[in-house]
Amino acid sequence: MDNTAMERFVPRFQGQPWFDGLRVLHVYLLPEPGVDDDLLALVHCRFAIRMSLSH
């Protein structure tokens, strides 16, 4: 068995180590009909589910 110590995984953002409480801007995209049909269907499905749960 290999006893080599594993390095702790530290996520990085813009080249710097991530720290607790770090917030980043979410990126939103708009699927284009005829090009991103699978993604568009998923978006519609998630929206419908969210709307049905909010009523």
Image (spheres, rainbow, N blue to C red):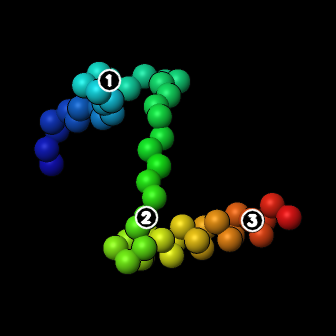
Where is mark 3, residue-wise? 51
Residue sitting at x 13%, y 44%: 2
Where is mark 2, residue-wise? 31
- Report x, y in % for residue 16: 29, 22
Task: For mark 3, give the secondary structure.
Answer: helix
In the image, residue 13 above or below residue 27: above
Q: Residue furthest front?
A: 33
Work out whether mark 1 precedes mark 3 in sequence or the reverse, and give the earlier one: 1
Query: Label 2 sits on what residue type?
Result: Pro
Where is mark 1, residue-wise? 17
Q: In the visual, does 3 lie left or right of 55? A: left
Q: Residue furthest right?
A: 55
Q: Residues within 10 Å of mark 2 (few under 14, many from 20)?
A: some
Residue sitting at x 46%, y 31%: 24
Q: Residues within 10 Å of mark 1 (few under 14, many from 20)?
A: few
Q: CA distance from mark 2 to mark 1?
A: 32 Å
